[in-house]
Image (spheres, coloured by chain):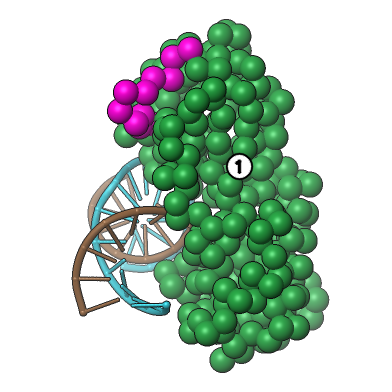
Chain colours: A green, B cyan, C brown
Amino acid sequence: MPELPEVETIVRELRQKMSGDVFKDIELRWPGSYQAVSGLSIKNRKITGLDRKGKYIIFNLQNEFLIVHLRMTGQIIVKKKLPADQKYLRVIFRMQSGRYLLFYDLRKFGRIILTDDRQNVLKNTGPDALQADFSMSYLLKRMQGKTLSVKSFLMDQRNVAGLGNIYIDESLYLARLHPESKAGKISRRQNERLYESIKMVLNGAIGRMGTTISDYKTTGGGFGENQNHLYVYGRGGEPCITCGSVIRKIKHNGRGTHFCPRCQKKIC
DNA sequence: CTAATCACCTGAAGGC
DNA sequence: TGCCTTCAGGTGATTA
């Protein structure tokens, strides 16, 4: 499940590999994966740079944007030749360099959008978790008065963009906060700890090229290595690395949620 | 504003 | 073996 660190890893690679290249042709193996705003064509569009906001990958073209969201199982792979394994291959871009930019997506949830209105695509995306506009005071103010759980708050991309199920569980563990704590009841001190924890967890994961649980791959087809450094995610039933208590896994708002019942305080 | 449910999809894993 | 159910979870729409 690509979240901010995985997407950031992909964007850095794409920036290095693809800047200056030109889209020559597109082949849709699954039409639902791709959508162009009416009148726009990807043909002969040059890549002038790459950006990321939250979990969105943004190819800057000369006057347009090619925006990719991998959702759960999307992968972007760059190859010199078409690979033999084309199962789950949904979109093929042929580049001027002769390379192929490939979009694989087992579950077909991912989306590629060609648009001249970047803001419209990103309208439900709040400040990016690693950018300056996501500040400690912003987080404090934004959580004020909220009765929902801190996990639900962080899952909502309008509040902060880039976090998903894995890194939220990890950040809350590091901040010693129970995921079901009420967002609006968290003290200033605890809020600061949460803020720092989010940054630590995300930057640590970027340094390890992301977390490969099942589907995430880098653009060369490689794996991340952060899955070997997780505190709680996927560790239900195993001992807490701090206190030895059994890590619990519960269902919270429809999502698997992992925490240490001893280290993480529930604030209600 | 918040919460719950569904829809979109496919495959793995567990129960019987 | 094989059928059925549940789980995996990001986002958007809908309904309460």
Circle 1 SS class: strand
Q: Nearer the viewer, residue A44 or A257?
A: A44
Q: Which residue is mark 1?
A: A52
Residue drawn at (62%, 54%), measured in percent from left and top? A128
Q: How many numbered marks are there? A: 1
Residue A113 part of the magenta segment? no
Residue drawn at (49%, 31%), measured in percent from left and top? A65
Give the left or right position of residue A206, taking residue A256 as reference. Answer: right
Q: Vertically, is A149 above or below A138? A: below
Residue drawn at (56%, 91%), measured in percent from left and top? A268
Give the left or right position of residue A137, taking residue A164 as reference. Answer: right
> Where on the picture, by quarter, is residue A154?
bottom right
Residue A41 part of the magenta segment? yes
Q: Nearer the viewer, residue A264 or A246?
A: A264
Please provide percent x and percent y for residue A261.
65, 84
Please provide percent x and percent y for residue A85.
49, 22
Residue drawn at (76%, 57%), measured in percent from left and top? A229
> Where on the picture, by quarter, is residue A106?
top left
Q: Which residues are magenta?
A: A34-44
Q: Main secondary structure of the magenta part?
A: loop
Please provide percent x and percent y for residue A165.
55, 61
At label 1, counting other C-alpha atoms closer than 10 Å, the crowd grade (few under 14, some 14-19, many 20 or more) is some
Q: Nearer the viewer, residue A72 or A117?
A: A117
* Mark 1: amino acid: Arg
Please provide percent x and percent y for residue A196.
76, 68
Look at the image and tell me whether residue A38 can be seen. Answer: yes
